[in-house]
Amino acid sequence: MSGNSNTDILLAGAIAAFTVDLIVYPLDTLKTRMQSPVYARLYTNIKTQKPSPALWRGLYQGVGSVIVATLPASGAFFTTYERTKSLLTHLNPRTTSSPTGLIPLPLFHATASSIAELVSCAILTPAEVIKQNAQMVSSASPTNATLVTLSKFRHNPLALWRGYTALAGRNLPFTALQFPMFERLKEGIRGRRERDGRRSGTLLESGCITAVSAGTAGAVAAVVTTPVDVVKTRIMLAAADEAKGLVDAVGKSVEGTRDTAKSVGRALNPLLRPEEKGKKSAWKIGQEIVREKGVTGLWRGGALRGVWTMIGSGLYLGVYESGRIYLASRRGENVKEEDLF
């Protein structure tokens, strides 16, 4: 990996993650609220069925936990991805007819990104659970949303990993789709500019090409994997109930008896009876969403997710790649184009 050290990769990944988190986090909050089972009750006007002002409040709730976890998670992802891709490429048998190797490179990209995602998800899952539950805390609460959420897990902190399988189940197909498309798009754009005689080779050009390629590929992958994301959101929002016992949507304790559950009615997840919360599989939750909202329920928030992923992926990988080039150039070294992803 010419020109880049592990420190470069970690720093570039951390800077990219921090930049994206701050910019697109409000869109992620809106998506979480739209996918929650209590969206209609808490965030829409009962008479008009249009979004209420509550939907737009507290859009940065829970951002602290994500920033803290995303930095090491993104560093772990990119380090694992780069090293795995490099190893697989090195082991790929080459012939005179196949100078790049007998096994297609997109398969290596998908494999490397999937392995890296499994490592990253192990670090990111607790923060993702905290974040999504914090995003649902009422903005009128006098206590910090993250602290309200953490209090639910104090007796069962292992519940913070409740959504690991769901997160990995969403991110694996997402990255397996995104990275091969991203690599192909980037190669195509660079080739087109080369043929047109417009290649400048500057850091700005490289960053822009990466951003456009990553944003386009990310948007497509995000929309395709939306049903998995909807189920993941439901599982992670239920994790707090599993850790603390029965709670309502704003974190207030509710007795776990059948009679009390009936009395709070819509304050609880309408898909799960109190005694079943936190015990249903992703498949069961998906089936219940379809029964409640129809097939379209699995695609709730898909357009918004596509938009914020396009912005986020474009910035994320654009800043990451530019950061690697910049950090290497400061030492008087160059990063070869073929070593960039």
Image: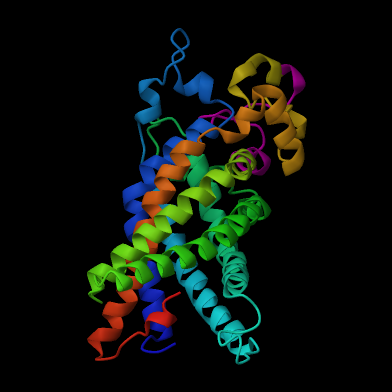
Taking the image as shown, residue 190 lies to the left or right of residue 262, namely: left
Magenta stretch encompasses residue 257: yes
Residue 334 seen in render: yes
Question: In front here: 277 or 28?
Answer: 28
Q: How is the image coloured?
A: rainbow
Specify the quadrant that holds the N terminus.
bottom left
Image: 163 above or below 302: below
Residue 61 seen in render: no
Question: In front here: 209 or 128?
Answer: 209
**Residues in magenta?**
237-259
Taking the image as shown, residue 250 lies to the left or right of residue 103, namely: left
Question: In front here: 301 or 96?
Answer: 96
Residue farthest to the top, as pictured: 47
Within the image, what quadrant is residue 297 found in?
top right
Q: Position of residue 249 (x, y in %)?
A: 54, 29
Residue drawn at (60%, 67%) of the image: 110
Magenta stretch encompasses residue 332: no
Residue drawn at (40%, 27%) of the image: 55
Q: Position of residue 244 (x, y in %)?
A: 63, 40
Residue drawn at (50%, 35%) of the image: 301
Q: Position of residue 23 (x, y in %)?
A: 31, 50
